[in-house]
Image: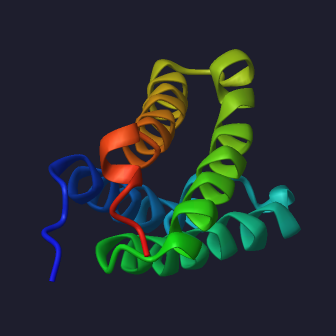
Amino acid sequence: MRSRPLPVTIAAILLVLGSLVNFLAPLMLPAEAGSVVYIIVGLGVLGLVAAGGLWMLKRWALWLTVVVAVLNILAAAPGLVFATDFSGRALATMGVVGFALVIVLAVLPGPRRTYT
């Protein structure tokens, strides 16, 4: 059995943490957000599935991770500009940077060769 590269381990852990934060969306978004909340929670579920696949070094999980991370970046990006307070901008920044880091760590050339 191959050993899991450290960047993949870090990417999986960051993806789990970011996906768990998505489950807090109903508490952070206003009630008018409606279906956006369901989409973000759904991204949390997909993120947990992708993190499990990354942990097991599955190739499909690499692509699911990239898709989920990009969608999370797109969901957090408006908060960089339109958030009304500092905490909203800080959370949006952490979301964008965290999920971008997940993508970078998951697709590095060395770890990328270990996916089956």
Question: Is the C terminus in the top left, top right, bottom left or bottom right quadrant?
Answer: bottom left
Up the image or down, 82 lies above or below 113; here it is above
Q: Position of residue 15 (x, y in %)?
A: 40, 58
**Front residue of 57 and 27:** 57
Q: Quadrant of residue 105?
A: top left
38 sits to left or right of 25: right
42 sits to left or right of 4: right
Q: Residue at x 86, y 69 (%)?
A: 35
Q: Residue at x 64, y 49 (%)?
A: 72
Colouring scheme, one of rainbow, by chain, secondary structure, one colour: rainbow
**Front residue of 57 and 37:** 57
Q: Residue at x 63, y 72 (%)?
A: 41
**Front residue of 11 and 30:** 11
Q: Position of residue 52 (x, y in %)?
A: 38, 80
Instruction: Count numbered badges in the picture.
Output: 0
Q: Position of residue 88 (x, y in %)?
A: 53, 30
Q: Quadrant of residue 113?
A: bottom left
Q: Position of residue 1 (x, y in %)?
A: 15, 83
Q: Residue at x 60, y 75 (%)?
A: 46
